[in-house]
Amino acid sequence: MRLVAPSILAANFNRLGDDIEMINRSEADFVHCDVMDGVFVPNISFGIPVVQAVKSVSKKPLDVHLMIVNPEKYIEDFYRAGASILTVHYEACPHLHRVIQQIKGCGIKASVCLNPHTPVALLEDIIEELDMVLLMSVNPGFGGQKFIENTYRKATQLKELIVKRNAQTLIEVDGGVNFEIGQRLYSYGVDILVAGSFVFNSENPVETIANLKQL
Ligand code: DX5
Ligand code: ZN
């Protein structure tokens, strides 16, 4: 699959509605919402009311990336705010299996994110339960960072694990994605590209989104 999820972290928050309308007009498959708590990551972005406001304007499903500690406390809140996919960090969940069941219990897609240093092999005993795995290709917390090359190897390992287990899990990559990197990621079996600054800093974001899907 070749899907694109623009990250609104790079949007203009003074006119967030206009940027969501742009995504509505585009061929984007999701709106990627980066929730940061200033504890799990060294930055604070936005939370439940903003996700709810985005949902009220968006025609695309919301792909909500929780960069927060204790995500189990807020699963139902983000479900009610309109998340279609909910991603929690492996590093933030000592009881990951339970949190995944909690997300699925809401009737939405459950996903786990791995930081750049977290090995893919740690998902061996849970991969069949996951609708999606999000590989961080930068250290989470900020947009506009440089893509970490080791992500290619992790994408390959993850694809092998998914195929070996005959799982239906999708692979998403987040951070520093552009055309060249996106093309390579798709060739390694990545299904969904997250792109923030590359989309929103481009001359024509609708066209950039379309081109990311055609790689
Ligand atoms: C980083 C976020 C990303 C970020 C990507 O912590 O998870 O989604 O917005 O931004 P770019 O595409 O600019 O690297
Ligand atoms: Zn993200």
Image: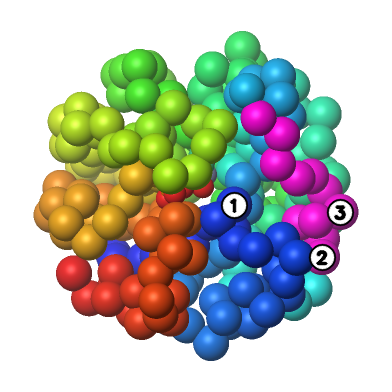
177 part of magenta stretch: no
Q: Which residue is mark 3?
A: 49
Gap between marks 3 and 2 measured at Cα: 6 Å
Contact (CB < 8 A) between labels 3 and 2? yes
Q: How is the image coloured?
A: rainbow
Q: For residue 193, which numbered disc appears in the image?
A: none
Contact (CB < 8 A) between labels 2 and 1? no
Please tell me whether residue 187 is drawn above or below residue 86 in the rendered image: below
Q: Which residue is mark 1?
A: 9
The segment highlighted magenta reads 43-54
Residue at image point 53% right, 37% down: 142
Q: Quadrant of residue 54?
A: bottom right
The extreme top residue here reads: 94
Instruction: Choose mark 3 or mark 1, whichever is in front.
Output: 1
209 relative to 155 in the view: left or right: right
Tell me the SS state at disc 3. helix
Gap between marks 3 and 1 measured at Cα: 15 Å
Contact (CB < 8 A) between labels 3 and 1? no
